[in-house]
Amino acid sequence: MDESESTADEPAGSVTRWIGELKAGDGKALQPLWDRYYARLVERARAKLLALRSATPVNDEEDVASSAFHSLYQGLRESRFPRLEDRDDLWRLLVHLTACKAVDRHRAEHRRKRGGGKILSEADMVATGADGEYEGNPLDRIIGSEPSPEFAAMVAEEYCRRLEGLGDDTLRRIAERNNLLLAIALRLIQWHRVQGPP
């Protein structure tokens, strides 16, 4: 349906009236606009996200449309849309806001700090054997049983710190000779495996 046509159950000029009420600060006027345009904006958001090859368009399209409506409402409250007068202006603005929100969502999805769009869920990593049978939790294969390099460095630092804390050279030599601190370090590693990181 073209937005310049009025619907049969709605008096001519009602969108223009609701826009005027919103500009005057009446937040209740947003509801009939929501009712009229939201479903179509969700479809626009879906199409835009699919065009952008967004990884999760089905999950985000409603958020995008809701965010566009929120921006419309905030913009009207802050008088940022002075040329918004009628249904045609409103539709163009809502489509523009929705497209911008979809692009923003797509960019956020692909930011490097969020994995560049290559984040896998556990279900995506299901481990299967050569025969196609399930082999267990894939995260178990990632974690491993050996201490991480970070943890090994932390243990080595703790070893040096405790060795230096002995103060007396004679005590340090005895400790090194008897590997007392090495035994403590090994106990720390075992504790870490059982308890998790401190």
Image: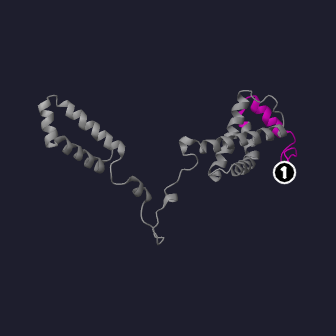
Query: Vertical placement of 150 versus 125: above or below?
Result: above
Query: Vertical placement of 157 versus 122: above or below?
Result: above
Q: Residue at x 67, y 49 (%)?
A: 61
Q: Is residue 116 left or right of residue 9?
A: left
Q: Residue at x 33, y 48 (%)?
A: 147
Q: Is residue 139 left or right of residue 163?
A: right
Residue type, numbered disc 1: Met
Place of residue 156 in the rendered image (x, y in percent of width and height, measured from the top left): 28, 39
Q: Is residue 129 left or right of residue 113?
A: left
Q: Residue at x 15, y 38 (%)?
A: 175
Residue carrying label 1: 1
Q: Nearer the viewer, residue 70 or 13?
A: 70
Element carrying mark 1: loop
Model colouring: one colour
Place of residue 85 in the rendered image (x, y in percent of width and height, measured from the top left): 83, 33
Place of residue 138 in the rendered image (x, y in percent of width and height, measured from the top left): 44, 59
The magenta-colored residue range is 1-28
Q: Residue at x 42, y 60 (%)?
A: 137
- Magenta highlight on residue 21: yes
Q: Nearer the viewer, residue 140 or 167?
A: 167
Q: Nearer the viewer, residue 162 or 139?
A: 162
Labels in figure, total: 1
Label 1 environment density (alpha carbons within 10 Å; few <14, some 14–19, many ≥20): few
| Residue 114 can be seen, yes or no | yes
The quarter of the picture where residue 173 lies is top left
Figure quadrant of the C terminus:
top left
The quarter of the picture where residue 103 lies is top right
Place of residue 186 in the rendered image (x, y in percent of width and height, measured from the top left): 23, 47
The quarter of the picture where residue 164 lies is top left
- Magenta highlight on residue 154: no
| Residue 198 can be seen, yes or no | no
